[in-house]
Image (cartoon, rainbow, N blue to C red):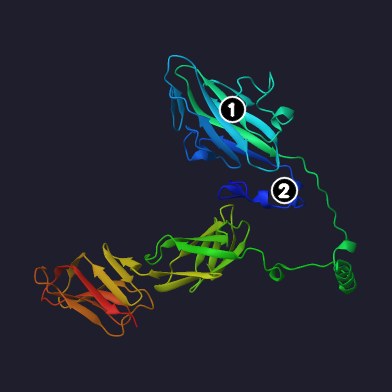
Amino acid sequence: MTDFFKHGNKVYSENLNDGILVGNSFDWTVNISLPGDTGGVFPNTTTVVKAKVADVYATPNSNLSIGETITNNAGSSQVYRLTVYPNFNRFGGFTFVSLEGDGSVIITEKGGTSPVRNNLDYTNLGSVTELKTLKEYDIVVTIPSGGVVTGLGFGFKSSSADVTASINQSNVTGLVSDLSSLESGKADTEHTHTKSEITDFPSILVTSLTVSDYNPNIDSTVTLTVTVKDEYNHPVVGEEVTVTASDGDFTQLDGSAITAASSVTGTTNNSGQFTLTYTCSEWGLITFSANNTSNQIRVSGWRQLKTFGTTGVVKTNGEYVYIYCADSISNVTSRQTRGIGTVTTGYEPISVFAVEASQDQAANHKFLVSTNGNISVSNATTSTTSIQVFNSIIYPLI
């Protein structure tokens, strides 16, 4: 109601029949603030401007600087006179006049110098009969030398409501028969509706399902955040939502441990969210789903299966097995093969894999892994020697 039923410069209510409720049956108040209602500046000429439901114009005063504020730079007090003519045909009088800044304010009849009544409370003018006649009034502001006025406000109220109406079954066509039909057709219990039967409830949506890391390493954890909002973008509190994962390894929900669960149901907090933690136990593409929303992560990287010796390690990325050792093996006898470790069961190669010692290594040897999972070094010299192992083997996991 910023413009108070205003169309251009003509008030809609001026065209309403006096019997229409909006015009006659409601008490309303219209507040006018200057310079806000005059485009950001105070009126400074006799040109009529519109302030909601009033015509206003100022009596020129060259001693005042008039714009977004009114400044008195003269050596004596000055008067800013604003003539107001309500054009609201239901005008019931002024309700208040207020001044922001320096000086004092009174309301007079047009061209007058004395207030319409002495000792008025300008914050409460609703009962002043002199201000209830539809005619032009002057709002007179006296500004001291050096004073500044930053705002001027006043209010109108409508004339008293004078129309009443009543509605009952007998004067509403068809109401009696409709009510009788409803009464005779109802079941033993009162009429009820389930949530699904009522179509004007806001739709509850899982608006996002985000993940803290979309390319995590194997055996790491990621945090999922579920956000639930309605169609008006308001958080939905206390909504239960089930999140599923394609391989099922949720491990935590708001601090509560869960063992290898393929789905977890959580309840949204005051922000319309709940969080849970997922352990990346399988390689590849993992899909998370919650109601109408889904998201994916791709798990990669190497998992350490075991260690052996001082530096030996066995790893896998789900497709290959990688074995590495950087140890010194002492007193390996001539043409001896010495075991130095084993591969985790289930990760043995389908055939023997072996690598020769590099040229800068002191001993002529092989680093190998057999089909039974034994990791060993083989001495090809004719004497007992200390073998420096700086070798790695990689083979496919079948």
- Identify the element where label 1 is drawn: strand
Measuring from the top left, give residue 197's x and y in whole percent. 71, 71
Sequence-earlier tag: 1 or 2: 2
Measuring from the top left, give residue 214's x and y in whole percent. 39, 65
Q: What is the crowding at mark 1: few (fewer than 14 residues within 10 Å), some, or many (at least 20)?
A: many
- Identify the element where label 2 is drawn: helix
The residue under the point 47% across, 20% down is: 147
Residue 64 sits in which quadrant?
top left
Q: Quadrant of the C terminus?
A: bottom left
Q: What is the crowding at mark 2: few (fewer than 14 residues within 10 Å), some, or many (at least 20)?
A: many
| Residue furthest left in the image | 359
Tell me if 72 is positioned left or right of 91 in this view: left
176 and 273: which is toward the camera: 176
The residue identified by callout 2 is 23
| Residue furthest bottom in the image | 351
188 and 174: which is toward the camera: 174
Tell me if 395 is positioned left or right of 359 in this view: right
The amino acid type, in three-letter code, at marker 1 is: Ile
The amino acid type, in three-letter code, at marker 2 is: Gly
In the rendered view, would you say 355 is above or below 190? below
Residue 128 showing in the rendered view: no
The residue under the point 73% across, 52% down is: 17
Q: CA distance from mark 1 to mark 2?
A: 27 Å
In the rendered view, would you say 82 is above or below 263? above
The residue identified by callout 1 is 139
